[in-house]
Amino acid sequence: MPLIVELRVIPIGVGSSIGDYVCEAIEVLKRVSKKVHIGPMATTIELEDPIEVGTIVKMLIERMRELGAPRIGIDIRLDARFDKEISIDYKLKRIT
């Protein structure tokens, strides 16, 4: 079952600049998904199995902890379509 997953990682207590943390989160996502679309407020990936979401969240938490973030928030949105195949590219073409 293909999924479109949007994730936003919010490091808390790391100062006013979070760019380095966001870059590291994006690197984690690039390792686990063949398709990554970086947006101004969140990053979207394509997955095949919903169980992967939990694994990715764990990886993000571990990486942020390694970087010294005392706390993080993670926003997740999922789009699962059952009547036909979906992809990030398909969704973007439909609105442009």
Image (tube, grey):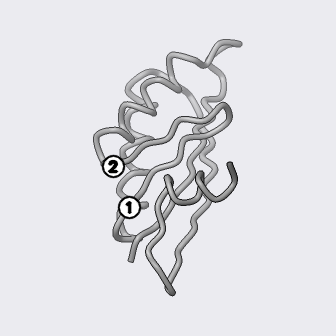
Residue at 62% across, 59% down: 77
Residue at 33% across, 49% down: 33
Residue 51, position as x, y percentages in the image: 37, 69
Label 2 Cα neighbours within 10 Å, binned few <14 / some 14-19 / many ≥20: some
Task: Point out the tag, 1 or 2, that comes first from the N-terminus.
Answer: 2
| Up-down relation of residue 80 to residue 41 (above or below) | below
| Up-down relation of residue 28 to residue 1 (above or below) | above
Residue at 39% across, 51% down: 56
Q: Which mark is residue 39?
A: none
Does the CB distance between marks 1 and 2 fall below 8 Å? yes
Residue 69, position as x, y percentages in the image: 53, 25
The quarter of the picture where the N terminus appears is: bottom left
Q: Residue 71's image quarter? A: top right
The residue that mark 1 highlights is: 47
Where disc 1 sits, the SS reads: strand
* Furthest residue in direction bottom, as rendered: 83
Residue 21, position as x, y percentages in the image: 51, 23
Q: How many marks?
A: 2
Q: Is residue 67 left or right of residue 91?
A: left
Where disc 2 sits, the SS reads: loop
| Up-down relation of residue 21 to residue 93 (above or below) | above
Residue 49, position as x, y percentages in the image: 35, 70
Label 1 Cα neighbours within 10 Å, binned few <14 / some 14-19 / many ≥20: many
The residue that mark 2 highlights is: 33
* Residue type at tag 1: Leu
